[in-house]
Image: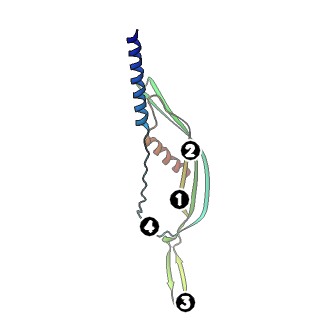
């Protein structure tokens, strides 16, 4: 009888020690490092005349069929797109002619208004993976690009 208690005590002790060691190993010290890289600084000559805020609800669904089209798997997401679009003029496209004698600057070939910038923020709601059709990083990137095109 004492041998059974000794075996049970040994097993419980080994289990307790291994759990404690795993707990210590799982305590990781998170270290972060941030480096700001400056790629390019350039002059910007843009004149924003219209700023639009948009909110759009976008329903995405993708169906893949497997096993000779006997089994289908659907992944879907409900995405709320918050976007801000800036419309204006790129002043670097203007031809300027200066006349120092008359102190007159003439602007020629004024460009048409264009979309200068679109800033999008996507919030995913009700994102469901299929059994054989799961969301990948490339799917989310493509969804983000589609949202920008939709706002444009």
**Residue behind mark 4:** 41
Q: Secondary structure at mark 3?
A: loop
Q: Upstream in the sequence, badge 2 or badge 1?
A: 1
**Residue behind mark 3:** 102
Question: How far apart are the alpha carbons under marks 2 and 1?
Answer: 20 Å
Please state the horizontal and vertical placement of residue 136, each as a whole percent of the image: 44, 39
- Above or below, 82 against 88 in this view is above
Question: In this image, 57 relative to 36: left or right?
Answer: right
Please state the horizontal and vertical placement of residue 16, each as a whole percent of the image: 43, 26
Foreground mark, 3 or 2, reads 2
Q: Residues within 10 Å of mark 2 (few under 14, many from 20)?
A: few
Residue drawn at (42%, 41%), measured in percent from left and top? 28
Q: Nearer the viewer, residue 105 or 74?
A: 74
**Residue behind mark 2:** 123
Q: Secondary structure at mark 2?
A: strand
Outermost residue on the front side: it is 2
Residues at circles 1 and 3 in contact by the CB criterion of under 8 Å: no
Q: Upstream in the sequence, badge 1 or badge 3?
A: 3
Please state the horizontal and vertical placement of residue 105, each as a whole percent of the image: 54, 82
Residues at circles 2 and 1 in contact by the CB criterion of under 8 Å: no
Foreground mark, 4 or 1, reads 4
Please state the horizontal and vertical placement of residue 62, each as a whole percent of the image: 49, 35
Q: Quadrant of residue 20?
A: top left
Question: In this image, 137 relative to 47: left or right?
Answer: left
Q: Nearer the viewer, residue 13 or 37?
A: 13
**Residue behind mark 1:** 117
Q: Nearer the viewer, residue 10 or 86?
A: 10
């Amino acid at each position: 009888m004492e041998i059974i208690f000794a075996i049970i005590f040994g097993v419980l002790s080994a289990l307790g020690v291994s759990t404690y060691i795993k707990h210590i190993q799982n305590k990781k010290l998170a270290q972060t490092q941030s480096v700001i890289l400056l790629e390019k600084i350039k002059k910007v000559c843009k004149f924003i005349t219209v700023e639009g805020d948009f909110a759009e609800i976008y329903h995405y669904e993708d169906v893949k069929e497997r096993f000779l089209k006997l089994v289908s798997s659907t992944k879907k997401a409900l995405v709320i797109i918050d976007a801000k679009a800036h419309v204006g003029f790129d002043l670097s496209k203007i031809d300027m002619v200066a006349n120092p004698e008359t102190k007159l600057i003439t602007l020629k070939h004024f460009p048409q208004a264009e979309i200068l910038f679109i800033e999008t923020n996507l919030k995913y709601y009700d994102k469901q993976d299929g059994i054989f059709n799961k969301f990948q990083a490339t799917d989310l990137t493509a969804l983000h690009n589609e949202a920008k095109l939709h706002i444009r």
